[in-house]
Image (tube, helix red, strand yellow):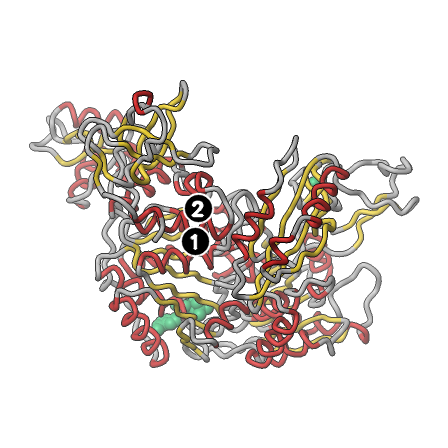
Amino acid sequence: MTEAQEGPAYFEEGALVAVLTTQPLDRFLDYKAPAGGCFRGAFVEVPLGPRRVLGVVWGPGKGDFDISRIRAVQRILDVAPMGEDMRGFLERAAAYTLTPLHAMLRLATRAPGLSDPPSMRKIYRLGDGEPDRQTDARRRVLETLREYGGLSFTMGELGQMAGVTNSVIKGLVKQGVVREEDTPRDVPFMRLDPDYGGKELTEAQAAGADALRAGVRSGDYGTTLLRGVTGSGKTEVYLEAVAECLRKGRQALVLLPEIALTAEFLTRVEARFGAKPAEWHSGVTMTERRRTWKMVGQGGAQMVIGARSALFLPYRDLGVIVVDEEHDTSYKQEDGVLYNARDMAVLRASLASARVVLASATPSLESWTNAEAGKYEKLELTSRYGKAILPQMRAIDMRSEDLPRDRWISPTLKRAVDQRIEKGEQALLFINRRGYAPVTICRACGHQVGCDHCDARMVEHRFLKRLVCHQCGETKPMPEACPSCEVEGKLAPVGPGVERLAEEAEKLWPDARQAVLSSDLFGSARALKEGIERIANGGADIIIGTQLVAKGHNFPLLTLVGVIDADLGLQGSDLRAAERTFQLMRQVAGRAGRSEKPGQALLQTYQPEHPVIRSTLAGDELSFWRAEADERRHAGVPPFGRMAGIILSGEDAAQVFDLGNALARNAQMLRDIGAEVYGPAPAPIARVRGRHRVRLLVKADKGAPLQAALAKWVGQFKLKGDLRLAVDIDPQSF
Ligand code: ADP
Ligand code: ZN
C-alpha cells in the first residue's frame, strides 16, 4: 500500500491534514482542514511563511509539533480533487526515478492559471425577433447563428464566420436579436462519438481490434505490443480500442513522439470520432492548456493527444493509453525529472486498471522482450494496408562509387532518383543531420569551431546564417577569421548536413521541385503542417529531410528513399547503437511505397557487410532482435539487467571529479546488492552550458533492489556550492 491510499477520504473542519506542496521540501506540511472540511486529494492553497503555495491534501496530518501553531488551509481550488490512482502514480514514479515527490507534483500541475478563480467569457446566441433594418452583414450573422443552432460563439468567432465587424454584432445585441451571455471560460470539449466514422477493417485489423476491445472491456490492467509493419494500419486498430474505451465512459490518452505529427493525426481522429480531442503539448496556448487540465479532471475531455507530459494530467478515469511509435527515443525526458514515458505509461495504467497499447513497426528491445516473455500481449500486422507492399531494400557500396570530393549522392542513387522523377514519382533523400555542415574547420590551422559553453562543435546553419550549438542552442554569426589563428577567409565546411545535401541536389536536378524538411526550417507547427501537406499533394519531386520525415508521415507518391549515410549511427561504443540504426533505417525506408506503387530503399554504406546493415536489408526482424537480445543478456544490461546513470555536474571540473571519486569509494551498499559501479568518467557530453559533467554507471541484476541502494548511496553526500547530481534510471546510452 502506498501512502496515497491510507486513511480517511474526508476531513472534517479543523482536522489535521498532510499537504504535499510544489515547494522543494522533503516532507508533507500539516494544516487544519478549512471550514466545510475537505476531501483527500483536494487541490488547495496553503500559507507557507508569508506566501501562499499550491498543494494537494495527501492524507491525515501527523500533528507532531505544537498544534496551536498549525495554520488552516486557505482555500480549496475549484478543480476536481486528484484521484487515488494519480496520487499512487506520483508516489511510485517518484520512487522509481528517485525524484522528490514535490518535483513529481510540479509535473502534474503544469497548467497556467490553475489557482485562478473560474473566469467568465461572453458568448453570443440567437435571440428573439427581427432587426429593425436588414443589411447584408446582419443577415450573415443571423444565418450563421441559425446554421449552427446549438453552438455559441465568442465575438471574435462569430465575426470571423459571418465576415462582419464587432459593431454589427453589438448592434444586434442592443436590439435583442442576438443574445449575449456569460459562460465559464473552461468548458467541456465536444463529445466524441465512438460510432461515428469507423473504417471497414481488414481481417487482420479486425482480429487485432477485437483483441484490444476485449481487453478494454475487461476493465483490468494489461499491456499489448501492437507490432505492424509501416503502413499496416495500426492507427485504425488502436483507435478501435479508444472507441471501446469511450463507450465505457472512460478516458483515452494517445501519446505521440513528435508535435509535428499531431496535425495529421488530429484530422484522422476527427474523421473517426466526429470531433477534435484535447491536445497537450508545448504548442498549445496557455488558455487551452488550462482548459484541458481542468476538463481532464472533471471528465469534460474524453480523449487527449499529447506529448509525454500528458501522462501527468489528472484523469478522472483513464481507460486506455496508446504509446505510438513506442520505440522512439524522444519518449525519454532528458531534462529535469528523467523518465521514460513508455515505462511511466505502463505504471500509470497498472494503477488505474487501464490498458496500454504500445504501437510500433520496430519495437524497442525492452518491449519486444516483455512480449516474448509473456508480460505483454502480442498483436501483429504483417502486411501493408491495401495494395501497398513493403519497399525492397538494397545497399549501395560506396567503396565502388565514383564520387568527387564534397559530393554525397552516388551515381547509382542519382540514376534511381532520375527514374522516379521521369515517372512523376517522389524521391526522399534522408540524412540525419541538421544544418549545413557538422564541422567548420580552419584550413590554415586545423582548428574546429566549437561552442564556448559546451563540449560540442558549432554547426553551420546557412538558412539561419549562423553557427548553432546543438547542445545548448547558443548561436553566433559565422566569424570572418578563425577564432584560433585569426587568419581570415579560411573557415570551411566539412561533411554534409541536410542543407548542404539540398544544395547538391539542386545542382544535380536543377529542374526538379525540391522540399527540405528539417525542424529548424519551419517557424511554426502550422508552417510545418502546410509543408507536409504540400508534399503529400505532390508539390515536390525531391524531398530532402532529417529524422523529422522518418516518423509516420504518409506521402502517397513517394516511391524511393535514399539514405545518404547509413553508417552514421554505427560509430561509437553505445550498446544501443545497433538497435537505433536498425529502427531508424526501417522507419525511413517505410516511407516509400505506401500507396499503390511499390517502393524501394537504397542505403549508401561503406560497410555493407556490417551485421546491422545486413539485417536491416534482410528485414528479418526476429533474428535481429534475437541476436541483439543475446548480446545484451551476455553483457547483463537492460532489459536483462538494471542500469542507472549518475550525472554529476558543476562549474569546477576538479570538484565534480572529486565528488565522483568519493561516490565510487563509498559504494558498499551497492556492492551489498551485487551491483557494480563504473566511473567516474566524463559524461557522453562532457560540458554543457559551461558545466562540467561526469558520469558513474551502476549495473545490477534484474531483481536487485536498485533504487533503495541508490537512494542510500547518493544520500551520503550533501551537495556543496553549485554541484548537482541527477539519477538516470535506464539511461539511453551505455
Ligand atoms: P501505420 O500506423 O501502421 O503505419 P496507418 O494506420 O497510418 O498505418 O495506415 C496506413 C494507411 O492506410 C493510412 O492512409 C490509412 O488511412 C490507410 N488504412 C489503413 N487501414 C485502413 C482501412 N481499414 N480502411 C481504409 N484505409 C485504411
Ligand atoms: Zn553549447
Report the residue at 62% width, 81% height from top: 618
Q: Residues within 10 Å of mark 1 (few under 14, many from 20)?
A: many
Residue located beneath label 2 in the image = 281
> What amino acid is at disc 2?
His
Tag 1 residue: 262
| Foreground of the two, 595 or 653 | 653
Cα distance in 3D space between marks 1 and 2: 10 Å
Percent of width and height locating residue 503: 71, 55
Task: Tell me the quarter of the picture where residue 460 sits.
Answer: top right
Secondary element at image label 1: helix
Outermost residue toward the top in this view: 50
Q: Residues within 10 Å of mark 2 (few under 14, many from 20)?
A: some
Amino acid type shown at disc 1: Thr
The picture places residue 77, in percent across and down from the top left corner, at 28, 32
Please name which of the two marks, 1 or 2, marks the residue nearer to the observer: 2
Q: How many marks?
A: 2
- The reply, left or right, for residue 100 in relation to residue 273 is right
Q: Is residue 424 visible to us here? A: no
Mark 2 or mark 1, which is nearer the start of the sequence? 1
279 or 225, which lies in front? Answer: 225
Q: Which residue is at the front of the view, 367 or 396? A: 367
Residue at left offset 28%, top offset 44%: 297
Q: Tell me the element at label 2.
A: loop
Q: Could you tell me which residue is drawn at 33 percent across and 28 percent down?
A: 45
Q: Position of residue 604 (x, y in %)?
A: 71, 70
* 415, above or below 51, in the image: below
Mark 2 CB within 8 Å of ligand 1: no
Q: Quadrant of ligand 1?
A: bottom left
